[in-house]
Image (cartoon, grey):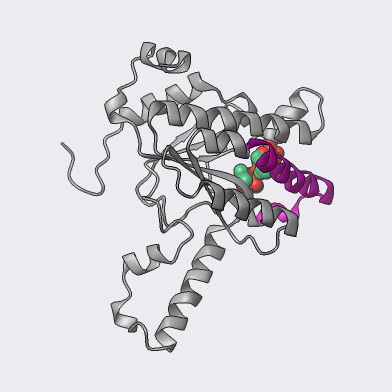
């Protein structure tokens, strides 16, 4: 048992009642850097370390799926220097961490429209997905150039095409059909969504998939989000009464 897991047990987490799938909006990198008088990119660099720690901790606890929002379809609107830094950071991280992900039984998957990303980054992404596709330790979905509305438009187009080809009839389309055409078709919906840095919004993240997800917002900035903070989020989750529209009690 790892030292981290022992720390968790000390905080009285119910290990039998953990979420199966945790999604995270990793926000506040820029503010973290600003508070320290550093350039924004230092916040992103530190944020990547936080994500690595969180993934390891999920695996130690037995949380099966972690989905992280790394770059939104709207984030292209940031200064070119920041966008370029992020693309280079993603590529470098994939090169650096692949061996360890393989050893740790991580199955990495990217969600989002990958086609506008730099070709060399797309290659690293495909390579890491291919190399880890049979791993079952922890499923790690990284949302890059992800936008929920764009995802739904793509799903509608794919479904409409099947109808047009006569493979599907319009009245047989149901919730399952739509879910099957989203990037997340292989994963169950998230049980818990964590957003750091205090913002109370979804910012175009998993709008369909979060229909009944428990939401936890913390003021902590993403680079400062550590095991103790995660324990707090999990403890909050364990106190929730997930009713799914049914009656109380
Ligand atoms: C989240 O941190 C990382 C990305 C969106 C890529 P931000 O860069 O949004 O940090 P703030 O919100 O400006 O502090
Ligand atoms: C959401 O954060 C996107 C990611 C964490 C990748 P943003 O910082 O882009 O969201 P807004 O602009 O505050 O809504
Ligand atoms: Mg932000």
Does the magenta stretch mainly form a helix, a strand or a loop?
helix
| Quadrant in the picture for residue 147 | bottom right
Q: How many marks?
A: 0
Q: Is residue 156 above or below residue 167?
A: above
Magenta stretch in the rendered image: 74-97
For the C terminus, give its image quadrant. top left
Q: Nearer the viewer, residue 146 or 215?
A: 146
User: What residue is at 38 percent from the left and 88 percent from the top?
Assistant: 166
Q: x and y percent of residue 148 in the render?
A: 53, 58
Q: x and y percent of residue 220 in the render?
A: 58, 26
Q: Is residue 247 above or below residue 220?
A: below
- Any part of residue 218 in sight: no
User: What residue is at 57 percent from the left and 45 percent from the top?
Assistant: 69
| Quadrant in the picture for residue 48 | top right
In magenta segment, residue 13: no
Q: x and y percent of residue 218 in the render?
A: 52, 29
Q: Is residue 130 above or below residue 1?
A: below
User: What residue is at 59 percent from the left and 38 percent from the top?
Assistant: 26
């Amino acid at each position: 048992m790892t030292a981290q897991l022992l720390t968790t047990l000390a905080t009285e987490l119910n290990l039998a009642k953990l979420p199966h799938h945790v999604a995270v909006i990793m926000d506040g990198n820029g503010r973290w850097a600003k508070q320290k008088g550093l350039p924004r990119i230092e916040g992103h660099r530190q944020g990547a370390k936080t994500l690595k720690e969180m993934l390891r901790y999920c695996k130690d606890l037995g949380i099966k799926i972690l989905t992280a929002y790394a770059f939104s379809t709207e984030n292209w609107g940031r200064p070119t220097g920041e966008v370029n830094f992020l693309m280079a950071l993603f590529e470098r991280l994939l090169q650096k961490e692949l061996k360890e992900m393989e050893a740790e039984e991580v199955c990495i998957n990217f969600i989002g429209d990958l086609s506008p990303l730099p070709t060399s980054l797309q290659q690293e992404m495909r390579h890491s997905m291919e190399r880890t596709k049979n791993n079952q330790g922890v499923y790690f979905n990284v949302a890059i150039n992800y936008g929920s509305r764009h995802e739904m438009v793509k799903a509608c187009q794919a479904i409409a095409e099947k109808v047009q080809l006569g493979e599907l009839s319009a009245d047989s389309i149901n919730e399952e059909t739509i879910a099957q055409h989203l990037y997340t078709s292989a994963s169950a919906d998230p049980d818990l969504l964590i957003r750091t840095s205090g913002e109370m919004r979804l910012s175009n993240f998993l709008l369909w998939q979060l229909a009944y997800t428990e939401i936890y917002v913390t003021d902590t900035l993403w680079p400062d989000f550590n095991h103790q903070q995660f324990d707090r989020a999990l403890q909050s989750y364990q106190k929730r009464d997930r009713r799914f529209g049914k009656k109380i009690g």
